[in-house]
Structures are given as C-alpha cells and as structure tokens.
Image (cartoon, rainbow, N blue to C red):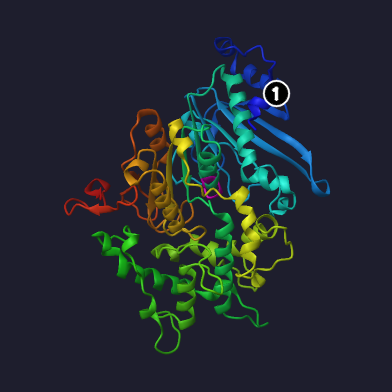
Amino acid sequence: MNILNRLPVILTLAVVGSAQAMDHSAEANCNSLSSVALQDTVVEKSVLVEAGPMPDSEASLPAHCLVRGTIESRVGNSGVAFGSKFELRLPVSWNGRFMFQGGSGTDGVVLPAYGERNQPKGNTPALAQGFAIVTTDGGHEDKDSSFGLDAKARTDWGYHSIDIVTQAAKMLLKAYYGRAQDYSYFVGCSNGGRQAMMMSQRFPDYFDGIVAGDPVFRLSASHIASMWDVNTFTAIAPKNADGKPVLSKAFSDSDLTLLSQSILQQCDALDGLRDGLVSNPAACHFNPRPLQCKGEKNDQCLSAAQISAMESSIAGPSDSKGNTLYSRWAWDPALSSEGWRTWKLGTSITEIPNAKKAGSSINAIRYVFVTPPAPELKAAAFDFDKDPQRMKASASFADASSTDLSAFRRHGGKIIFYHGMADPAISALDTQTYYQQLSKAQGGEQATQQFARFFQVPGMTHCNGGNGLDSFDTVSAITSWVEKGHAPDQLLATGQAMPGVSRPLCPFPSTARYSGTGDPNVAKNFSCR
C-alpha cells in the first residue's frame, strides 16, 4: 500500500510552504529535517556538508544536506534488528532532479549517495551535477545473506524497501526545497539494474526515467548458472597435494588469452572491421574445438576437458533431461580479463575458492533463494533436477521479468537497458531475450523503441571493466530523452582498455558498422545499422 496514502505526514518545519522554505539558510533547512515526522520513519542525522573532494575519487562534491534515517524498524528472527536504512543527499544548488541510486549484490549496506556506484567509468557523479540522490541498504544489515531467514526481510529486499525509501526521500526533498522534484530517475547496475526494472514493473509512476545496467532480473535462475559454472570448472581443475581441486587453476591466464585471441580471429571481422571488438555478437558462432591439443597440454592448446567445460558453461545450465534452466552466454574476447576470472574462477591457490560465484552466490541461494532456507547447502551438492524447483518461490519477490510495462508507458516513462557482452555474472543474452520479449509484448520493435532501448556493450564485463569500451554516459542520455524527447540513437563509448578509440553503442538490434572511410578509431566514422 502506498505509504503516502496510509501514513499521515506531519511536517513540523516552519519552512514548509514553497517560497518560505528557501528563505532560511541551507544549514537551518538541513538541520530542521530531523524534525520532519513521517510515521515509521526516524531521521537520525541531517547536517550540511561543505563542498569538497569525493573520497577515493578525483571528483568534487558540492555543498549538500546529508540525511540518514531508518524506516520500519523492527526486531525479527533471533532478535535481529531490521529496517530500511537510507542516505539522502540534497545539493544546495539543485537542478530539480531526484535520483535513486541502485544497490549491489544482496545489499546490506547503505552506499554513499553520490550517484556513481557501479556505473560506467569516467562520468561525473550525479550529485556533482545537481541531482538529489538517495540510497538504501534494502532493509537489512548483513554480508552473508542470512537476512533471508526472515520472510519479511526477503520481501523488503526484493522490492518493498525501494518503495518506501523512494516515498520518504521525496517527502524530505520537498520539505528541504519547498517544492517537489521536476523529474525522478532510477539508475542502477547489477542488483541496481534489477531494482530499476522492478520499479518500471511494480511502481510504474514513481520514476520518469530508468537506467537498468547488467540487470540481475532473474536472480532465481542466474544463481543456478553460478552453481553450474562452479561445478563444471571445479570438475576439471587440477588437484593440490591433498587431492582437492583448485578452482582457479581450471584455466590459466594463458589458456584464457588463447581463447580470447581465437574468438577475435573467428568473430572480430564479422562487424566489418578488425578492431579488437566483437561488435556483432549475433553473428559470432565461435568454435573452440580447433584449439584442442593434439598431444600433451601446453600454452598453445586446450585440453579436451577444458574445451568441453567451457562449451558447457557457455551453453548454460540444464537438468538431467536437457531442459534449459537459464540462458546461453556470449562468446566475447574479454573472458581473458581480470573481471571474468574474478567472478568465474578466482585467484585462490588453495582448495578454498575465492571466485564470487563460489562465495556470494551459494550464500544467497542458501538463505534467500531456496525456500525454505537451507544454510548447510554446499555448491558441490547442488541438484540441478531438484534444487531449481526449491528456488522458484523466490521469483515472486526477487525477479523482475514482467514484460507488461503498459502502465510505465502511460506514465510517459523511458527506460534504457545496457549490458556488457562479457559479463561473467549475468548473461547479456538473457537481457537480450527479455528485450525481445518486451518488444513482442509492447507492439513490436518500433513501438517499443519509443520508450525502451537496449544497448549491448562489447568487451565490457560486469557493469564496467573488461577489454572494451566501458565509459559512456547513460545519465545524460536518459535525462535528454525524458526532458527533451531526444531518444538515444547511440551512446558514445570510450575506455582505458582501448586508449584513443571511440565507438557508438547502438540500440539493439542494430550494430556499429564502419563507414569504410576516415579514422577507424573515431566513432563518427561508424553508423548504427
């Protein structure tokens, strides 16, 4: 139920009342926010922060009001404290825009509300651009997903916290500035991308513009793929002196580089130019079989077991009857990048793996995605016939897979999807399939592109990084689309991995094609077709 309808809002500020609000100093206004009474909400801090450098960044932040609070505090199972904690930053020089900055993983921590977390590299934080920004911990504070033992905490994390924090933040914003925001945006990647899609589906009138990057929108299925990869690669990993497999050694860096180079040889030129990027992934039907060793294993070939394991990983998980349980993955040369190894294999030289898929994924499955929770479940014991059935119930609160965005369209909302084609955490092809289904449900490709566009990012891993071009400005793209009606016909991409190179990212299903003349390193010499 809408918090604004069910909760009487008592604004005890003398500043409430449009013009009167701005007559007070920024500091007085900010300090007074602790007196705003929202039922089930406690404002624990409201202080003015002077302009200065952003921590661990070259960016500078403007003077702003920092607000921290908690909504719906309660005590759950075993005396564990729950509540949707939030951080709201309100710049003194405001551009009239409000942004919800999406979270990551299974949340559990309130990230600084700067408007830059998990976004493509090189962009100015949205706070520094004049946006008011809010973040939340998703209703819990833990790092091992054990919040999932509490049924309400699961739902809070799935979508309820985003709902109530959005509404409370907008009320506090109105109290501070004396008026409501002109435009509202949700921008997130990974779990933040899932949250972004959730808002377009469950709360279609909350946001005018949404950016969903590398979205984990089918978490209940994507974690099955995590177990598939962990078990597939562990099965071929060399064993240590104790006879225990070492996951990180399933593929050496040389092995992955060999695969990467072979993918480029087979697929790079399919977009019309050999440039180190596979910009036409639909045409890439990579075959790793020619890399199989004819004799002993060496750095110039892969073993038959390695090839079989990589093909199995790319094909995605299935049950014993061959039924598909998730999605295929794209062959992208950035599988040789640090980010791909971090997620799939890790770097641990012991039998205890540190790959993200072997750690955070199994914890999430145990506590959040298996119903009832199964804290003792081991990755090696995951049953691909039985356990996926136990995970289906979690889709009701965690998945954002609906293609009914009709209410969002009626609201006038616009949404940008993007996904790194080398993402080792979430398959870019799963997002592509969702977009294709969305287009079918919303009247076809042309009709859908009037409010929703999907951009594939070759060479990028999860949200950023990889071997490609991972710097592009989605915030400017979504604000221009919402406020000026300028639909993004392309996004200009650059990246540290390819200095001096720029490319257009094209709305699916078009791809970047070289014109045949001009500098092939410059984006203007490419078109989307």
Residue 325: tell me if it is visible: yes
Left or right of 64, for residue 70: right
Residue sitting at the far left: 517
Please identify the quarter of the rendering in which residue 236 is found: bottom right
Give the position of the N terminus as an image quadrant.
Answer: top right
Residue 190 part of the magenta-drawn span: yes
Helix, strand or loop at label 1? It is helix
Magenta span main SS = helix
Viewed as shown, does residue 258 lie left or right of 165? left
Q: Is residue 212 above or below residue 390?
A: above
Residue at the outermost bottom position = 295
Q: Where is residue 308 in the image (x, y as percent from the top left)?
A: 47, 78
Q: Callout 1 environment at 10 Å: few (<14), some (14 to 19), or many (20+)?
A: many
Q: Is residue 100 left or right of residue 307?
A: right
The residue indicated by pointer 1 is 34
Query: Front-most of 185 and 31?
Result: 185
Residue 75: percent from left, percent from top: 80, 41
User: With respect to residue 14, does 465 lie above or below?
Assistant: below
* Amino acid on which the number 1 mark rests in the picture: Ser
Quadrant of res 229 = bottom right
Q: Does residue 519 show up magenta in the picture?
A: no
What residue is shown at x 24% (from left), y 48% (from top)?
527
Per the rendered image, the range of residues in magenta is 189-193
Q: x, y (%) of residue 54?
A: 54, 37
Residue at image position (44%, 71%) is 256
Residue 136 seen from this side: no
How many numbered callouts?
1
- Residue 214: horizontal and vertical position, in percent? 48, 51
